[in-house]
Image (tube, rainbow, N blue to C red):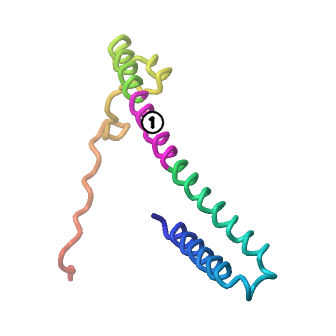
Amino acid sequence: MAREERRSLNKVNKWKQVAAAIRKNQADFAQFGEATSNLEARTVEVSDLHARQSSLRAAKQDVSRNLEQALREGDAVMDLLRTAARVRYGTRSEKLIEFGMLPYRGRRRTAVADGTEPAPAPVPASEPVE
């Protein structure tokens, strides 16, 4: 139960306590009969709203669970169809772009454009040179 829900239920309990005390001592508080009835009506209303909120929260959890399951199943079907496209067209086909996949275009070369090997990176000296 959430903290806010507990707080509001505590308020409702206090309302019930005050309304019962007023009803018990009705002779001393005759002029507050209408206000007491209003408080009792609010108590019933808030209790009904709490019950409705709880049922809606449960329904929301069910819908969320169903949504997650539908998304997982959709991803599985999409993976199946993408795999079928990859098998049908090959891994290097530009046609794969239509399916949201990148075709395999090979590894990039690390050699410099003029054909020579790149110079090795300088090794930092561990001791200062004098």
Location of mark 1 (residue): 66
The quarter of the displayed image where residue 127 is located: bottom left
Residue 32 position, x and y percent, is 78, 80
Residue at 27% x, 51% y is 119
Between 43 and 125, the residue placed more toward the observer is 43
**Does residue 64 appear to the left or right of 13 in the view shown?**
left
Between 53 and 69, the residue placed more toward the observer is 53
- SS of the residue at dot 1? helix
Residue at 46% x, 41% y is 62
**Does residue 13 appear to the left or right of 129 in the view shown?**
right
Residue at 78% x, 82% y is 30
Between 42 and 93, the residue placed more toward the observer is 42
| Name of the residue lying farthest toward the front | 27
The quarter of the displayed image where residue 41 is located: bottom right
Q: Amino acid at mark 1?
A: Asn
**Does residue 40 appear to the left or right of 50 in the view shown?**
right
The quarter of the displayed image where residue 73 is located: top left
Residue 126 position, x and y percent, is 18, 75
Figure check: 55 above or below 92: below
Neighbour tally class for label 1: few under 14, some 14-19, many 20 plus, Cα within 10 Å: few
Figure check: 38 above or below 59: below
First to last magenta residue range: 58-74
| Name of the residue lying farthest toward the right | 31
Residue 93 position, x and y percent, is 40, 17
- Residue 62 in the magenta stretch? The answer is yes
* Location of the C terminus (image quadrant): bottom left
- Residue 46 in the magenta stretch? The answer is no
* Location of the N terminus (image quadrant): bottom left
* Most frequent secondary structure within the magenta stretch: helix
